[in-house]
Amino acid sequence: MSRILIVDDDSSIAEILEFNLKNEGFEVDTAMSAEEALKKPIAEFNLILLDVMMGGMSGYKMAEKIRKDGLIVPIIFLTAKDTENDMLTGFSVGGDDYISKPFSIKEVVARVKAVLKRTGKSGVSDKNKLIFDRFVLDFNLKELSIDGEKIALTKTEFELISLLAKNPDRMFSRENIIDKLWQDSPYITERTVDVHIARIRKKLGDYASVIHNRAGYGYRFNTGNL
C-alpha cells in the first residue's frame, strides 16, 4: 500500500484529500505546515502532496530541503498560482507534478496514480543510501553495489552516477553535469562527460542501459531498466 503525505495549512482541503485518497486505498498522513511535515519520516512516504503557499516555510523551500537531503520521494505541488514561472519554479526545486487550485478530486487521484506508476521503482531512500531494487548507492562508503556485488568506481564516476540517480528520470545536459561536478575546472569539455559515462556504463555491464542518452539533450537515470 502506497503511503501519501498531505501538507496543506487549509484543513478543509487536507481533509477532503485525505478522505478521498483513503477511499482509493492509500494510506494517508497529514501535516498543517512544512515544519510539521519535516518532523515525519519523509523517506517512508511514497508521495507528497505539497501546498506551495503556507505560513512559515513554503512548499518550494520544503521541497528544496528534501532534495538537498538526498530524498527522492515524489512531490506533487498544490497551488493557487498557475503561471509558467511558478510551474518552472516547482520543477526546478524537484517537483514531479503541479496541480492548480481549484482542482477536481478525480484529477488529483489520477495525477497521484500516474506519478506513483512512473516512479514506482524509486523505492527506499535516506541520507546515507539510495536503493533501486537491486541497485544500491551507499553515500557513506562511496560505493555502488548491484545484486550485492561492489562495482569499482572512481570518485568522479561515483559522483556522476549519484547525481543522475538522485534525480531519476530528469534529463541532465552535458553542461548541467559539468556545472555540478567540474565547476572549478574551466578546461573540462562536454567530451569529458561522454568519456566518464562510457566508463561507468562499461562497469555496469548488463545494467549499462540504466544511464540513458537522448541525442541533443543529455543523460538521465532510467529506473525502468533496473
Image (cartoon, helix red, strand yellow):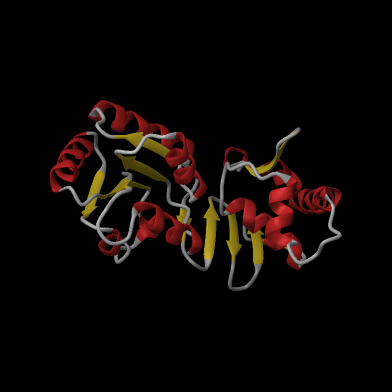
- Residue 116, placed above or below residue 129: above
Question: Can residue 22 be seen here?
Answer: yes
Whether residue 25 sits left or right of residue 131 in the image: it is: left
The C terminus is located in which quarter? Answer: top right
Figure quadrant of residue 23: top left
Whether residue 9 sits left or right of residue 225 in the image: it is: left
Residue 56 versus residue 197: which sits nearer the camera?
56
Residue 118 in the image, given as x and y percentages of width and height:
48, 36
Residue 200 in the image, given as x and y percentages of width and height:
77, 53
The N terminus is located in which quarter? Answer: top left
Q: Residue at x 17, y 47 (%)?
A: 10
Residue 180 in the image, given as x and y percentages of width and height:
67, 58
Q: Residue at x 74, y 47 (%)?
A: 174
Residue 84 versus residue 156: which sits nearer the camera?
84
Residue 162 in the image, given as x and y percentages of width and height:
63, 58
Whether residue 75 sits left or right of residue 68 in the image: it is: left
Question: Can residue 112 be seen here?
Answer: no
Residue 48 versus residue 77: which sits nearer the camera?
77
Instruction: Count the numbered circles shown.
Output: 0
Figure quadrant of residue 22: top left
- Residue 139, placed above or below residue 111: below
Q: Residue at x 63, y 51 (%)?
A: 164
Q: Residue at x 33, y 55 (%)?
A: 58
Residue 226 versus residue 3: which sits nearer the camera?
3
